[in-house]
Amino acid sequence: MSSTLFEKSHSGRRGINIPKQVVADAPSLDGSLLRSAKAELPELSEFDVVRHFTRLSNKNFSIDSNFYPLGSCTMKYNPKVQERVGGLDGLANLHPHHITNNKTSLVQGALKSLKVLENYLTEITGMKAFTLTPQAGAHGEMTGVMMIGAYHKKKGNNKRYVIVPDSSHGTNPATAAMVDYDVITVKSNKDGSMDLESFKEAMNDEVAAVMMTVPNTLGLFNPAIKEICDIAHSYDALMYYDGANMNAIMGVIRPGDIGFDVIHLNLHKTFATPHGGGGPGAGPVGVGERLMEFLPDLTVDFTEEKGYFFGEVSKNSIGKISPFFGNYLVLVRALVYMQTLGREGMINASRKAVLNANYILSKLKDHFDAPFKNYCMHECVLSAESLTKEHGVRAMDIAKYLLDFGLHAPTVYFPLIVKESIMIEPTETENIDTIDFFCQKMIDAVELAKSNSEAFKNLPLTLPISRPDETKAARSLNIRWQA
Amino acid sequence: MSKRYSNEHEWAILEGGVASIGLSAYAVEQLGDITFVELPEIGAEASKDDSIAFIESVKAASDIYTPVGGEVVEVNEELENTPELLNEAAESTWVFKLKVSDASEFETLMDEAGYKAYIETL
Amino acid sequence: MPYTPHTKDDVQKMCAQIGIQSEDELFASIPSELRAKSFDVPEGLSEFEVFDNFKEFASQNDTSKVSFLGGGYYDHIIPTAVDALSTRSEFYTAYTPYQAEASQGTLQALYEYQTMICNLTGMEATNASMYDGGTALAEAALMAVRISRKRKRIIVDSGVNPIYIKILKTYLAYHELEVITLEVKSDGSDKETLLSLIDESIAGYIFQNPNFFGSIEDYFDIIKALHDVKAVAIMSSYPIALGILKSAGDVDADIFCGDGQSLGNYLGFGGPSFGILACKEKYIRNLPGRIVGITDDREGKRSYVLTLQAREQHIRRDKATSNICSNQNLMALRATIFLALLGKEGFEKLSLQNYNNSEYLKAELLKIDGVKIYNQNPTFNEFVIELPISASEFIDKMEERGFFAGLRLETLYENFENRVLVSTTEKRTKAQIDSFVASVKEIV
C-alpha cells in the first residue's frame, strides 16, 4: 500500500508525450561529456502517476480536511481565490531575467504589486521599508541579523552576542550562529515573559541585538517590552521582532511604534498563504530608519515619469540573499489576502484568534496543568506534566490520541521551558463546533489517561501507520529507494 | 583504579598515564536512543573541557567535552556501526582514550558518590 | 467578516465561558501607549474585486512574446497533471510532516523526490529541498567548510551563475573566509590557474556545468586534484542538462547543488522554485534541511519519517547545520510528479531535444553575417552570440518582432558588451526558431 513509484515501475511503460522535435538530430557530444547511463527514473503511464499521487494525498491531514491547532504555526484557512490569482498567466509565466535586462516596461504590473504589498506591510507594522526577498521566516531572520551585523560593523562597534529568551523558536539562536554571533539565553519569569531583571544583568556593551517574539511563544504579552527596547537602545543594541505571532496583534500593536529596528513576518502564517506541506513560505523583513541603508539589493521605487523601477542599491546593502524577489507567487497570495480582509478584516481576525484561544484555555485549564492561567493571546500553553507523573501519559500520547478523531495534534514539546508542553493555536477561522469538539476530545484524553493509560501505547489506530520507529530510521538510514 | 566524573557527565578512568573516557548512564538516558557517534581523530590534541567528539540521538545532539587534556591515542571504532552499545552499557563502554598531559586534572573531577549527589540536584 | 464564522451568539457564549463581558478585555494588558499609532490599511474587498485588481496587475506584465531567455530559468513544459495533483488541497494545505502518522502522503512523496534527485545527480544523499539554487550553492560552500574541518578558502568559478555568486558572497561575509573568484578564460574555466591555486588551504571549489554561458567541460582531472589535497568539489548544474550530461557522481564530485525551476515549476517572476543540495553518503550529517527516511511502525508497516532531525534548528538551536526551517515542499512535490510523468526514457528525450533545438539555432545563426558564437566549447541548450550592435538595441528590436531574445550579459560581466545569452528548450518549435533567425538577420 505504500509502495514507491519505483516499485510500481514497469520497464517499457511510457509517460507523457512531449512536443515533437522537428529539427534534425545534431551530432552527438563527445562521450567524455555524456552520462554513462540514463538516470534511473520510474517508467509509468500518466494515469499510474495520477493514481499514485491521488492516493498519497489521501494519507495526509491538511487544513482543508482537519483542525490543525499547532501553536505558532497559524494554520488558518487558505482562501481559494489565492490559487486562482497565482495561476494568472501574466504572473505565473513572467520571466525573472527581465530584471537582469532592466526591462521595467515588461514587468510594471509585477513591480506595482510589490510596491502595493510593501505599502500594506509598512502600515500594518509601523516599519519604514521592507525587503520582500527572503523566502521563509528563517531566511528573513538571517537577513535581519545580517543587517544588524552590517550596522555595527559600519559604526565600528565591537559586538559579539545576541540575546534571546529561553522560550525562543529554534531558528533564532541558529540564525545568530549563522552570522557568527554567540547566543546569551535569558530565562523567563513565572509569568512566562522574559525576566526583566535577568535581562538587565545580561545586557552589556557587546550585545548586538535582542531577538523577541511578541506575543511570545507562550502566547503571552510582555508588559515590559518598551522598557526592554529602551534599555537595548541605550547600549546601541538593536531590537529584532520575530513576527511569527503577528496574528494576535493586527491593528492593536505595531512593532515599529514600540521601537523594534527590524522585523520579519511569516506570510504563510498570519497572511494565510498555504503551507504546502512544509513550504514555500515567505519572510519579508521590515526595517526602521537605522537599518534602511543595509537592505538587500532589490527594491521597487515609483515616480510619475518613470513608473515603477528598481531602486538604487545602497552602497551599504548587505547584498543579495535571493536570486530575484524571492517567492513572488507567494507574495502575491499574501497581497490577495490583505486586500480581501482590509482594515476591519485584519483587526477582526486578531480579535477572533485571541477569543478562540482564550475560550479553549478556559475550558481546558482545569483538566490539564496550565502554567499561565490568566488570559493568553492567540495561543495557549498547557502541560501534561501531572498526567505524566501520575499516569505515565505524556504530551506525545495526547497528540496521538487526537489523530484518530481527525484532529491534528497541537504543538508538543515546544517551547522548551514548559515540561510536557502542549501549545494550542486555533486561529480565527475555526468555528465554535469544531473548537468544542476539540476540547471535548482533550478532556476525554485526560479521562482515558486516568482510567486506562496503557491504551495510549497503540494510538493512533485508524491511520495508515502508528508509532513509527524513529530510532531505527536514524540507525539504519535509508533515504532513497534502491532496488 | 577509581572512576571520576565531570559535570558534563563524562567519566574517566586513569591508568598508567592513559585516561579512558566515556559517558555516564545518566547522560545516555537523557539523550535517549543513540544513533550516531563522531569519534575524535587519533593524534588530536585537546585541553580540559574542549569539545572533542559529538553524539547524536533521535531527539537530541550533544558535544562531548573531554574531562582531562591530552592526546587521543585510541578510539572505540565499534561505536561507529553500533552506537547502541552506549544505551546498553554506558558506564563500561569507553569512547576514546587520551594520553594525559596533566594528571592533576584528574583529581579535580568528582568521585562516584559526588557525581551521584550532583545529578540529584539537576 | 471574511473567513471568520463567529455569530453574535457565538461571541456571547464564548465570552461567558471565559468570564468576560467583551473581547476588549482580552487586550486589557496592552497599555494605551503601546497601541498602534495608526492602521490606515484600505478597506476589504470581495474576492471578485480583488481578482480584478490582480488581473490588472497581470495585464501590465508582458508574457506574450516567444521566449529565448535562459540563464538558469527556462520556459519548459509543465504537464497539466503536475498542476492537477499539486493543487489538491491535501497536499498544499498540509503542514510540515512532523507528525508522521498524519503526513504519510507528504513524506512518501519526499522520499521519492530524494530518490530521483540522487539518481539524477549521481549522489547518495540529499535533503527535501532548499529555497533555490543560489542559497543552495551558499549552503554547499558552508558544508565544504565544515567537512574540511574549517579550512578558510573557497574558490568559485566565474562560470557559475553570477547572481548565485552574489548570494554566496553575502552568506559567507560573516564567516572569516576568503572567497577566490576564478575568472573564466574565454568561455571556459581557467584550469591552469585553478590547478596552481589548489592546495591544502582550500576547503572547496565550486563550478557550474554547463556554465552560465552554456558551455560544457570535463572536470574530472580538476576534481582529482582537489581530492589529492582533501578539498571538496561542488558542482552546480541545471537539472534538465543531467538528462544527457555527466552527473556529479560520474565526475566524482562531493556535493551537487542546483535550482529546480526547470522541473515542472512556473517561472513566477523568480519564485517560488526550490534548491537541490545533494552529496556523497559520508557527508550526510553535514547536510542542512529536512531529510526523510524509511522505517517500520509498531506493527511492522513501512513508514516514512523525518529523520536525522538532530542536525536541525529545532533541536540543535545555535549548533544547527543551518537555521533553515521551511523547505520548498510543494515545489519539490511538483518536480517529483514532473519526473514521474516523463519517466526514464522521456527525461532523456526531453534533454536531448533541448540540445538538438539549440544546435539547430546555433547553426542557423552562424549563417548570418555579423553574428558570432562566443562559445568555443560545446554547449547544451544555450550559448552566447556576439553582435555588431549593442545588446540593448538587439533585445529591443527583437521584442518589437515578438521575441524575448535573451540575456544582456554586460549587466553581469565586465567587458561583455554586445553579447547576449540565447537559450532554447523543448518548447521552441522549428518554426519559431526559423522566425527568430529571420528577425536577427533583419536587424544586424
Image: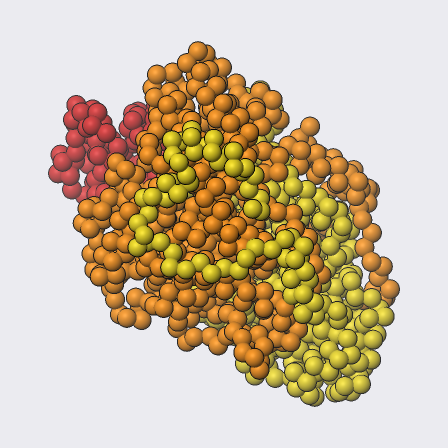
Answer whether residue C95 is visible to the viewer in this image.
no
Hey, which residue is sitting farthest top in the picture?
A: A451
Relative horizontal placement of residue A47, taking residue C288 as reference (left or right): right
Image coordinates for residue B109, horizontal then vertical, percent = 16, 34
Residue C391 quadrant: bottom right
Question: What is the quadrant of the N terminus of chain A in the image?
Answer: top right
What colour scheme has been applied to the protein in the rendered image? by chain
Q: Residue at x 56, y 79 (%)?
A: A304
Q: Is residue A391 left or right of residue C417?
A: left
Colour chain B is painted in: red
Residue appearing at x 33%, y 34% in the figure: A374
Q: Nearer the viewer, residue A32 or A125?
A: A125
Query: In front here: C379 or A244?
Result: A244
Q: Quadrant of the C terminus of chain A?
A: top right
**Residue B121 visible:** yes
Report the residue at 43% width, 33% height from top: C15
Q: Position of residue C372 (x, y in %)?
A: 72, 82
What number of labels is visible? Answer: 0
Residue C319, position as x, y percentages in the image: 36, 47
Is residue A257 positioned above or below C384 on the image?
A: above
Q: Which chain is yellow?
A: C
Q: Is residue B60 left or right of residue B43?
A: right
Work out whether residue A87 or residue B6 is closer to the camera in this orientation and state it: A87
How far across and how far down the image is residue C206, in percent? 52, 62
User: In the displayed structure, would residue C441 be above or below residue C114?
Assistant: below
Q: Colour of chain A?
A: orange
In the image, is C104 to the left or to the right of A27? left
At 71% from the left and 73% from the top, the residue drawn is C404
Q: Quadrant of residue A465?
A: top right
Of residue B108 and residue A173, the one placed in the foreground of this image is: A173
